[in-house]
Image (cartoon, grey):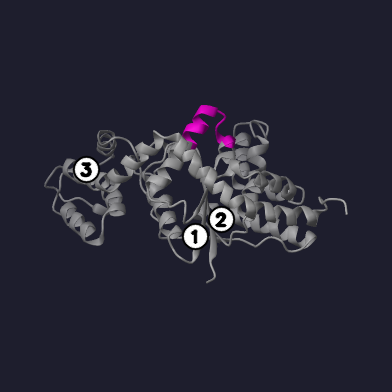
């Protein structure tokens, strides 16, 4: 049976929240369980250094995110689960790719362009505060994808450029040195839920409007109680489609439960009652995973062993590909 290599990178910054779970973690774990998929899921800890130079925060976030994915059901025996920094061939490949990647391509990367535009708007030098990590991260991202010749890379619509750049870099290399790299395909699922945050905007660490995934039940309830609502009283009909409480409910409920809650909104359910039901629904789904998460966080040695085992399974693949790359580029033993 032919399998498809699907690669997902997980940036190790911040604490996982409900939006991460609904929009990325839950669908990725479901995809990893398909028999015709070889799932590669990695902690992008090198990328984290672009945004955060606090070593304790980088290490803690990496640990929390590894524990989160495993607690939510990722099977490290059925998929390849690894830490980017444990595969040294990735950074070696990144340098080799950077020697043929066009600088103009890097100039067009969204993150770099946004930094330049912000500096110019503030009257600063265009490159003020810009690190080489921010400028050249598309090359590292290409190496992440190409080191295992991934076929498909699930991304949000705003991240398609990352995969397009990896394709461009791979094509340029293949043209010059011979075909070594598979050209990856960006996969966008327009049906993936984008969860609203406490203030009604997209749930994002950048907005400070997130609901942490594995807080205590009391903390979860407190966060849900902070969801912004209007001033309609109990008994007054409410527009479910304009309510963050209902939007989050839909991400955790089945179709029958959605319709029941929609009818409750039309019938004038009070905001306190709606939030209580939302808390109970979310807490019921997360409670078993929360217990597993707490056990994993209390046993960092187990987490480390799982990630090291993942890297050990993959190193033969990455080493074999790098042998081909070195030979193709002339970095070969004298013979």
Residue 160: assigned label: 2
The residue tagged 3 is 275
Asked whether residue 104 is in view, the answer is yes
Q: Earlier in the sequence, mark 2 or mark 1?
A: 2
Image side of residue 67 versus residue 175, left or right: left
User: In the image, is residue 14 above or below residue 73?
Assistant: above
Marks 2 and 1 in Cβ contact (< 8 Å)? yes
Residue located at (20% from left, 54% from top): 261
Outermost residue, right direction?
335
Q: Give the range drawn in magenta.
A: 49-62
| CA distance separating discs 3 and 1 | 32 Å
The residue tagged 1 is 188
Q: Position of residue 207 (x, y in %)?
A: 42, 37
Secondary structure under the numbered disc 1 in the rendered image = loop
Image side of residue 201 versus residue 50, left or right: left
Label 2: few (<14), some (14–19) or many (≥20) C-alpha neighbours in 10 Å = some
User: In the image, is residue 163 above or below residue 203?
Assistant: below
Image side of residue 335 versus residue 202, left or right: right
Secondary structure under the numbered disc 2 in the rendered image = helix
Q: Give the main secondary structure of the magenta stretch.
A: helix
Q: Position of residue 310 (x, y in %)?
A: 53, 48
| CA distance separating discs 3 and 2 | 36 Å
Q: Which of marks 3 and 1 is nearer the N terminus?
A: 1
Q: Position of residue 184 (x, y in %)?
A: 61, 61
């Amino acid at each position: 049976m032919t399998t498809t290599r699907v690669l997902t990178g997980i940036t190790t910054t911040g604490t996982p929240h409900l939006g991460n779970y609904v929009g990325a973690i839950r669908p990725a774990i479901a995809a990893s369980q398909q028999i015709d998929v070889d799932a590669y899921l990695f902690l992008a800890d090198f990328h984290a250094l672009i945004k955060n130079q606090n070593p304790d925060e980088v290490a803690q976030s990496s640990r929390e995110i590894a524990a989160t994915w495993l607690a939510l059901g990722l099977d490290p025996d059925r998929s390849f689960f690894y830490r980017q920094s444990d595969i040294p061939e990735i950074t070696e490949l990144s340098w080799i790719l950077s020697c043929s990647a066009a600088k103009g391509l890097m100039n067009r990367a969204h993150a770099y362009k946004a930094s330049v535009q912000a500096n110019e708007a503030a009257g600063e030098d265009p490159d003020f505060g810009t690190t080489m990590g921010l400028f050249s991260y598309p090359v590292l991202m290409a190496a992440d994808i190409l080191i295992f010749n991934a076929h498909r890379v699930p991304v949000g619509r705003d991240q398609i450029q990352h995969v397009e750049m990896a394709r461009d870099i791979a094509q340029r290399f293949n043209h010059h040195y011979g075909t070594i790299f598979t050209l990856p395909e960006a996969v966008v699922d327009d049906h993936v839920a984008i969860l609203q945050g406490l203030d009604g905007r997209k749930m994002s660490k950048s907005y400070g409007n997130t609901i942490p995934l594995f807080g205590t039940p009391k903390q979860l309830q407190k966060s849900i109680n902070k969801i912004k609502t209007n001033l309609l009283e109990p008994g007054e009909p409410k527009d479910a489609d304009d309510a963050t409480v209902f939007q989050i409910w839909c991400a955790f409920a089945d179709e029958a439960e959605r319709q029941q809650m929609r009818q409750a909104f039309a019938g004038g359910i009070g905001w306190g009652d709606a939030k209580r039901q939302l808390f109970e629904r979310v807490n019921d789904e997360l409670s078993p995973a929360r217990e597993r998460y707490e056990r994993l966080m209390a046993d960092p040695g187990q987490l480390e062993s799982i990630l090291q085992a993942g890297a050990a399974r993959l190193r033969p693949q990455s080493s074999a590909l790098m042998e081909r790359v070195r030979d193709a580029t002339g970095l070969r033993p004298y013979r």
